[in-house]
Image: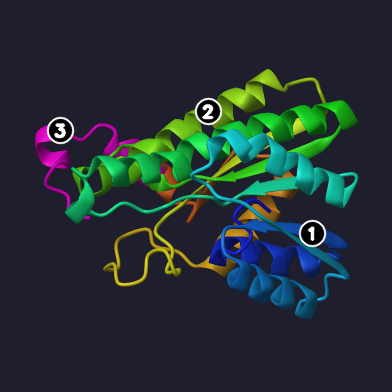
Amino acid sequence: MLGGTSDLAGAVVRALARRRLRAVVLAGRDDERLALASQAASAAGVPDVRAVRFDAQDVDEAARVVDECFDAAGSVDLVLSAVGVLSHRRDELDPARTAEVVSATYSWPAVALTRAAARLRDQGHGRIVVLSSVAAVRVRRENFVYASAKSGLDDFSIGLGEALRGTGVVVQVVRPGRVPTKMTEGLPSVPMSTTPDAVADAVMAGLASGATVIWVPAVARWALAAALLVPRSLWRRIPG
């Protein structure tokens, strides 16, 4: 689990534990939160829980971190990417903050997923599940730095899946609405909001169906299709 300390990753681990998940490697940026996430996974019934620390600003180390996770796990059935940093309007013109958001939300995950894909291809099977966002479908003014980074990762992941066709490795992209998590704490409720457990349930259903794109809630698929037809003069007025 890349970004294994996130609320969404935790919900997916719990959902997998109910389906007899035997082992998980949680990769995260904070030792204290890694310890808490590991305890939660063990409490959910996962017999073998391991932790790997990484820094999402250190893109050069992304491939090594993935190798460390694979070496700790042995054979890997599922790689989940839940890495990202949310941007805010107050710091959208701060170059350093833009670099931080883009690195953690696009660059680091893209490099890590490239390495994960190679490892899964070598073993001949496995799935990659990438947590994207409905914000990636059409970028809004309110969070354009984060949303554009998610958009890049979303397109990258779908392209990666196409590149892996016929190898035994499948890539699935999850596009949830806004989820009340530690990352979104304090932000107002918006249409098509969802919950960590709902996202986890949708991931389980997507693993069963093999869908390339998983929308949460499902109605978001049609709402965003309609949003693509909205003129930009009106789109820019939509609040965040």
Q: Earlier in the sequence, mark 1 or mark 2?
A: 1
Please tell me whether residue 164 is drawn above or below residue 189 in the rendered image.
above
Mark 2, other Cα within 10 Å: few <14 / some 14–19 / many ≥20? some
Q: Nearer the viewer, residue 84 or 45?
A: 84
Residue 126, quarter of picture: top right
Q: Name the residue under label 1.
A: 24
What residue type is disc 2 on?
Phe
Q: Is mark 1 on a helix, strand or loop?
A: strand
Q: Position of residue 67 (x, y in %)?
A: 77, 39
Q: Mark 2 points at which residue?
A: 156
Q: In this view, does 80 lie to the left or right of 221?
A: right
Residue at mark 2 to residue at mark 3: CA–CA distance: 25 Å
Circle nearer the viewer, 3 or 1:
1
Left or right of 119, for residue 11: left
Tell whether position 157 is magenta. no
Residue, x 60% and y 73% (percent of image)? Answer: 32
Residue position for label 3: 232
Q: Can you see residue 52? A: yes
**Residue at the farthest bottom position:** 43
Could you tell me which residue is drawn at 64 percent across and 59 percent down? 4
Over which residues does the magenta segment extend? Answer: 222-240
Instruction: Specify which label sits upstream in the sequence, 2 or 3.
Output: 2
Question: Between residues 202 and 82, which one lies in front from this camera angle?
Answer: 82
What percent of the width, then of the height, locates residue 204?
Answer: 70, 56
